[in-house]
Amino acid sequence: MTDIAPTCCGRTARLTTGREIYPNRRDLHWKHFYKCDRCGNYCGCHPGTTKSLGTPANAATRAARSNLHDNVFDPIWKSAPATSQYDAEDHKAKARILKAARSRLYRYLAHHLGIDRDACHFGMFTLEQCKRATEILTGLSYRTVRDWHYAQVKQEGKAA
């Protein structure tokens, strides 16, 4: 299977390495990136692959994506085991809880952004989508997400 290069400025981005993107960061020289030669936007690749993590972006959009993911989104789903309904009796149970919580939160965010769940990926978000997602998620508790999820399941069950 060949990885598909992302596009930017109407052109296919070029595969390069961290040596070009971050010349002063030797620890990143071995990583792969896609860079747009027209505007200079870039994005990283999944570790050890040439599969793009999203679409090339400028510094402001990359910072917004990173902040949204690390400081807004992740703390919500990672708090799931602490909710009173769950009893993570072992490591495997906790891992299952976290996996379900992350999936539910992505579904919640996609629903509230009005996009398909498969398109709900931070690496593909525009700056405007990052701002909107931050507004949606700020102050949100995992308990609210869980309750929303169960209401959706119940509603879907009635529609079937």
Image (cartoon, rainbow, N blue to C red):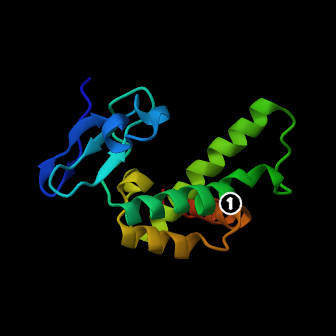
For the N terminus, which image quadrant?
Answer: top left
Q: State the count of labels.
A: 1
- Residue 8 picture location, percent across and down: 20, 54
From what the image shows, is residue 125 above or below residue 136? above
Amino acid type assigned to the residue bearing label 1 in the image = Arg
* Residue at image point 62% right, 61% down: 71
- The residue under label 1 is 146
| Left or right side of 57 for 121 | right
Whether residue 138 can be seen here: yes
- Residue 63 picture location, percent across and down: 46, 61
Helix or strand or loop: what does disc 1 sit on?
helix
Which corner quadrant of the image does residue 60 belong to?
bottom left
From what the image shows, is residue 17 above or below residue 154? above
Q: Residue furthest front?
A: 24
| Left or right side of 75 for 124 | left
* Residue at image point 79% right, 49% down: 81
* Residue at image point 65% right, 60% down: 150
Q: Nearer the viewer, residue 91 or 24?
A: 24
Which corner quadrant of the image does residue 113 belong to?
bottom left
* Residue at image point 15% right, 58% down: 9
